[in-house]
Image (spheres, rainbow, N blue to C red):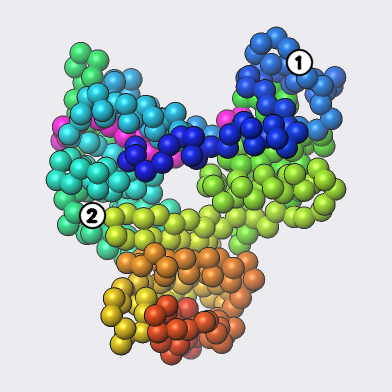
Amino acid sequence: MAGLATVDSITNPDAMFENAGITNIIEEVTQVDTEKKIVVLSNGTSIDYDKIILGTGSVPVIPPIEGIDFEGVLSLRTAVDAEKIKRFMEEKKPKNLVFIGAGFINLELCALLSEMKPDYYNMTVIEFLDYPLPLMLDPELAAKIEKYLVEKGFNMIMASKATKILGGEGMVTGVELETGETIDADMVMLSVGARPNLELAKDMNLELGKFGIKVNKYLETSNPDILAGGDCVEKIHFVTKKPAPSQLRGPAVIQGRLAAKTLAGYKIEFPGILNNSVVRIFDKYIAATGFTDEQAQKEGFETVSTTVDSRSKHGMIPGVKPWTIKLVFDKKTQRLIGGQIISDSDAAVKEIDTVNALILGEKIIPELTTLMCAGNPDCSSEPSLEPITIAAEQALQKLK
């Protein structure tokens, strides 16, 4: 939509598969006969199979709001969606934009559009929960992002519900809130979650869980000849070992590779998810992994958490940019179970992957006080101020 990438540049060309000896068939699968082991296609042909890998993905959740069918009410999940949004904006030239949902997709889109046409759009973000990025951040860090977006000119309406989409002559004209207030809208973006595509799995009588197709650690379904991965499967959270929702690129890519390894005879287990994610909103980089404080407490953990302000370079070096990290620990076991970062530096935000690895390594507070990171005045803060270690030091003191 920003003209920074084409659809072709973000999709794999057919030739890549064909050159590897893979046959591409662009048709819809209408039926799978698991007894005869036959896949039936929409063009009437059928294919025999030995094994199947299902990657049926997910679709956006569309809330049951009156007026949802007006032209100009859009959602973003696929490249086709992006092209539709771009075409609508080029043809209709909307000025008043309303975003329902304050997750990273909508906020990233807000920022992107604002950067394309500074001071042109009137942006309103409506969120049912109390603050933006509720799946990534705790309230005190989210408040910083909300304030930042307000300073950028956004109308942030938190803890509010859109109850009706208004329109005339088939076109969207506004959004009505549960308070009765109305917001002018030439375009409405919906982003309130996604649900797995399970129709084919149901037809195949595969066992389903609360959040998708049930698979084991090797991505095998209840049918031993059918594997599945990506948005359509139920995943296990690494910390709780319980099913959890997750529809992110990272787990989908790894599960695709792992399914191939399983077919090739390897026995490598999928470790579970931590929902490691990162987003850029204007000049702010936000990342999270594992549980927030609030999420952990809802899961029954008694938590110890610490927040540390850091900087991208040694204090004596020009161009220093601030960043903040929050770590969440389970008080009982002292294990690290979550982390959040807000940064003005794109380099510093990638420390979330270090936090992610430390959670997977089941590191505890005392061990993190001895974490030794590479240091250089141009690349990191002073070694004595390494924020993960400082956060662990502070948590250690809180335990007393």
Classify mark 2: helix, strand or loop: helix
Residue 149: mark: 2
Above or below, 82 against 270 in this view is above
User: Where residue 197 appears, x then y in whole percent?
Assistant: 58, 30
Q: Nearer the viewer, residue 347 or 239?
A: 347
Q: Nearer the viewer, mark 1 or mark 2?
A: 1
Residue type (three-letter) at the residue carrying disc 1: Ser
Relative to 51, is 41 on the left or the right?
left
Tell me if residue 292 comes above or below residue 314 in the rendering: above
Residue 42 at x, y percent in the picture: 65, 13
Q: Which numbered tag is attached to residue 46?
A: 1
Local crowd size for mark 1, using a 10 Å CA cut-off: few (<14), some (14–19), many (≥20): some
Residue at screen point 68% across, 57% down: 271
The circle on residue 372 is none
Residue drawn at x 32%, y 41% is 2
Name the residue at 61% across, 76% down: 363
Task: Please determine whether, in this image, residue 395 is positioned above or below residue 55.
Answer: below
Instruction: Please give left or right for residue 342 compared with residue 329 in the image.
Output: left
Q: Residues within 10 Å of mark 2 (few under 14, many from 20)?
A: many
Residue 311 in the figure: left or right of residue 165: right
Vertical arrangement, residue 235 with respect to residue 332, above or below: above
Q: Is residue 176 visible?
A: no
Image-quadrant location for residue 343: bottom left
Q: Quadrant of residue 40?
A: top right
Q: Find the magenta span and give its range.
A: 181-198
